Amino acid sequence: MPRLTAPRRQAEVCAPLPAAHAAARYARHLPERTLLYALVQAHYPDFIARLEAEDRPLPE
């Protein structure tokens, strides 16, 4: 079997997936249900208040 050249190999690796996969629908991620989101939501107001009390605003 002849050896494939790099561009052809790359094209085969990057080829579109079969049509069966294309039928899959987008499912929205739910970041508001993550632990990180909950932690930021809980602590961000205190963080901003502390920065303002120390006269250290966030960079723009």
Image (tube, rainbow, N blue to C red):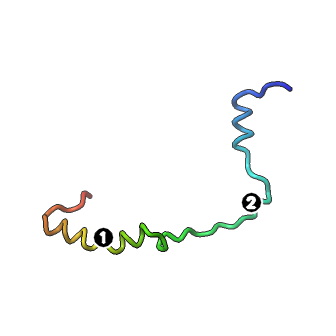
Q: Residue at x 16, y 61 (%)?
A: 56
Is residue 9 left or right of 37 when viewed as pictured? right
| Quarter of the rendering occupied by the N terminus | top right
Q: Earlier in the sequence, mark 1 or mark 2?
A: 2
* Whole-number angstrom distance, CA of label 1 to CA of label 2: 40 Å
Q: Are marks 1 and 2 in contact (CB under 8 Å)?
A: no
- Measured as percent of width and height from the top left, residue 57 is found at 20, 62
- Which residue is label 2 attached to? 22
- Which mark is nearer the camera, 1 or 2? 1
Q: Residue at x 27, y 73 (%)?
A: 45
Q: What residue occupies the far left of the structure in this picture?
A: 54
Tell me the kind of residue under disc 2: Ala
- Measured as percent of width and height from the top left, residue 41 is found at 36, 73
Q: Nearer the viewer, residue 16 or 51?
A: 51
| Quarter of the rendering occupied by the C terminus | bottom left
Is residue 51 left or right of 1 when viewed as pictured? left
Q: Residue at x 70, y 29 (%)?
A: 6
Tell me the kind of residue under disc 1: Tyr
Q: Residues within 10 Å of mark 1 (few under 14, many from 20)?
A: few
Q: Residue at x 30, y 71 (%)?
A: 43
Residue 19, compared with residue 11, is above or below; it is below
- Which residue is label 1 attached to? 44
Q: Residues within 10 Å of mark 2 (few under 14, many from 20)?
A: few
- Measured as percent of width and height from the top left, residue 26 is found at 65, 66
Residue 49, compared with residue 57, is above or below; it is below
Which element carries disc 2, helix, strand or loop?
A: helix
Residue 46, compared with residue 12, is above or below; it is below
Please count the marks in the image.
Answer: 2
Locate residue 2: give its quadrant: top right
- Measured as percent of width and height from the top left, residue 47 is found at 25, 68
Is residue 50 left or right of 41 when viewed as pictured? left
